[in-house]
Image (cartoon, grey):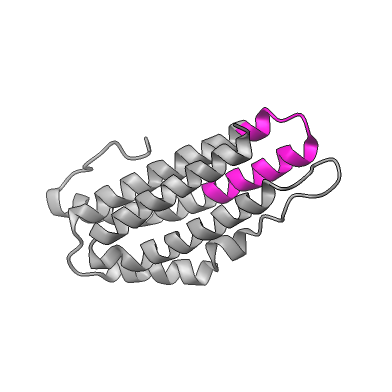
């Protein structure tokens, strides 16, 4: 199985997991999960198009992180609305953990794929995919920080080893 086929299969599986999390997640997390679901679909389509690239004769499709992730203003609104939600449920935290792990591990795949590729344009393509996943992970981290701060305020101490995730 080649790397792009494996990546497309992996991303399809991740999309299915995100859909399952979305069905069970609390209301305060739904706007984020909707945007995440759209990201995942577009990311899969990008990988599908890349599978048909002959690197010696053509070019990989462009990785437009703004098109995949949306605008910073939209993410700031999601973060503000999430922070403003009155009673966040602990299930939001566990859903964010799961989603973060999926995004982080898949980003590691693209980093490794780039490092193990002989062709410069393939390395660049995979590096772009890895960076896009890292950008998404940092946005998830913002939501997790909101949860951590609220839990800390409720129980009086840092609930987890902060800075270790």
Name which residue lies at 62% across and 51% down: 48
Above or below 108: residue 79: below
Name which residue lies at 32% across and 45% down: 97
- How many numbered circles are shown? 0
Magenta residues, dominant SS class: helix
Image quarter where the N terminus lies is top right
Q: Is residue 51 left or right of residue 7?
A: right
Name which residue lies at 55% across and 60% down: 42
Q: Is residue 142 left or right of residue 54?
A: left
Image quarter where the C terminus lies is top left
One can see residue 27 in this view: yes
Residue 118 in magenta?
Answer: yes
Above or below 54: residue 45: below
Residues drawn in magenta: 113-134
- Residue 64 lies, in percent from the top left, at 65, 59
Name which residue lies at 40% across and 55% down: 142
- Residue 124 lies, in percent from the top left, at 72, 42
- Residue 24 lies, in percent from the top left, at 23, 58
Quarter of the image where one finds residue 19? bottom left
Residue that protrudes farthest toward the right in the picture: 57
Q: Is residue 113 left or right of residue 9?
A: right
Q: Is residue 40 left or right of residue 33?
A: right
Residue 19 in magenta?
Answer: no
Pick the front one: 71 or 58: 58
Pick the front one: 134 or 109: 109
Above or below 16: residue 23: below
Above or below 8: residue 71: below
Pick the front one: 16 or 21: 16
- Residue 128 lies, in percent from the top left, at 65, 47
One can see residue 148 in this view: no
């Amino acid at each position: 199985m080649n790397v792009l086929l494996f990546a497309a299969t992996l991303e399809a599986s991740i999309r299915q997991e995100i859909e399952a999390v979305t069905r069970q997640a609390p209301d305060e997390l739904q706007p984020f999960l909707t945007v995440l679901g759209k990201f995942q679909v577009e990311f899969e389509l990008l990988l599908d198009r890349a599978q048909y690239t002959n690197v010696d004769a053509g070019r990989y499709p462009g990785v437009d992180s703004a098109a995949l992730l949306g605008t910073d203003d939209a993410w700031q609104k999601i973060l503000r609305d999430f922070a403003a939600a009155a009673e966040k449920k602990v299930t939001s935290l566990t859903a964010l953990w799961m989603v973060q792990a999926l995004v982080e591990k898949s980003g590691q795949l693209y980093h490794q794929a780039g490092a193990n590729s002989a062709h410069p344009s393939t390395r660049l393509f995979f590096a772009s995919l890895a960076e896009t996943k890292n950008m998404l992970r940092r946005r998830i981290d913002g939501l997790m920080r909101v949860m951590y701060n609220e839990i800390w305020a409720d129980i009086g101490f840092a609930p987890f080893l902060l800075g270790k995730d």
